[in-house]
Image: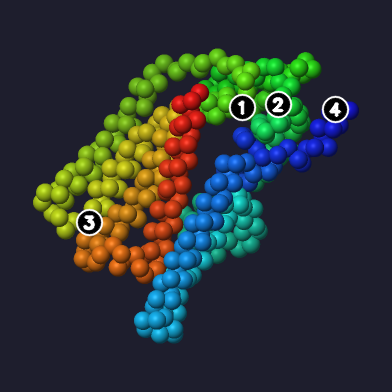
Amino acid sequence: MEEEKIEMQAQDYGGILYEISDAKHILDEQKGKVGAKAIAQRIYMILLGAALFGWFLYSLIAAAIGVGVGKAIVGHLAAFFVLTVIEVILMLTAFGAWGAFLRAAFRHNVRAGKTGREIREIDRLEEELAELDENKKKENAVRIYKEYVVVLNDGEETVLRRDSLQRVKCEPQYGSYRITFFSSDDTQVEARHLLPIADLPLIKRFFDCFEYVPASREKGYVKKKLPTIGFMFFPLLVGVALLIVRSLVLPDMPIIFGIVFVTLSVFFMIMQFNDLAIIGHGVEPILGGLIIMALPIGIVLTILDLTGMGFTEMMSEFTVVHAGIGLFIGLGAMLVILGIADIIICKKL
């Protein structure tokens, strides 16, 4: 009877806390109700979309007062179309609808007008999604909810109550972790889907009875990464040199060139260690967010240098460039916030 009761509640597990599956793409929505973190991200992106729309309206009204309604509308047409695309992007991201959107697009002539390389990228993504959809019949997954743990092995689902778990054990295997759940009714469920090492601290916080065997780094772990790190020192030095030259010799040179070289090289160096939780879930998204913000900020600084305009004067208008600047700075700031939050979580464990 207890198992039947759990099966009846299968669609009512509550907000999902963690999920990993071999039948889902990163673009697919989570299985179950949205958790607190996803709700916060959704609210943030909705507010970002509202802020960009408000900025557009302010600019349109100000232009209508200054040059007339007709000229204002014509002058804002391009920005309106770009803003519409941005709003769609934000809403698809906020509600986890990219997977469904792309699958629908693939059913139509999405390749029309595309070049050879673009078509290859579309084909690759379509094949990837099709393969994941095929895996749904024999899905392997681990899903953690507030009150339940759901394990799927070859499509067979086992639902455990979190308050009935006596042990949750993780053991290193093939550079990942194998997780096994032990329930008070002697039920033992070993998940076939392996967990990334970097996810361990995020999972550990959900269980008081968590046990794990620390994974040892393979021999020469750092040595194998040195060639890539060494290679990235060249663009880093180029970026530093460009910033120095701009400061001392060529003040008219756009600052964005140096920013791009420095930020991207540091990011790719850090990425070599993203199997460490604090790097993969914290430092990497923070650096990624800073890079996303650095590019539009660099563009703004370059425009200010070249035109001599004031910052307030430049940002009072809403154009295609402003729409892109607002989007990238907004999304970059979100990544920084999420990265800081995950660093705090990892440091507490």
Q: Which residue is mark 1?
A: 206
Give the alpha-carbon distance from disc 3 to disc 4, as whole Å: 67 Å
- SS under mark 4: helix
- SS under mark 2: helix
Front position in the image: 157 or 192: 157
Mark 3 or mark 2, whichever is nearer to me: 2
First of labels 3, 1 by sequence position: 1
First of labels 3, 4 by sequence position: 4
Q: Amino acid at mark 2?
A: Arg
Kindly indicate whether the residue at mark 1 contacts the one at mark 2 (C-beta within 8 angstroms): yes
321 relative to 289, above or below: below
Q: Which residue is mark 4?
A: 2
Q: Is residue 128 visible?
A: no
Give the alpha-carbon distance from disc 3 to disc 1, as whole Å: 48 Å
Front position in the image: 120 or 61: 61
First of labels 1, 4 by sequence position: 4
Mark 3 or mark 1, whichever is nearer to me: 1
Q: Amino acid at mark 3?
A: Pro
Give the alpha-carbon distance from disc 1 to disc 4, as whole Å: 23 Å
- Residue 208, image x and y in percent? 62, 20
Residue 56, image quadrant: bottom left
Q: Which residue is mark 3?
A: 254
**Residue at the right extreme?**
1
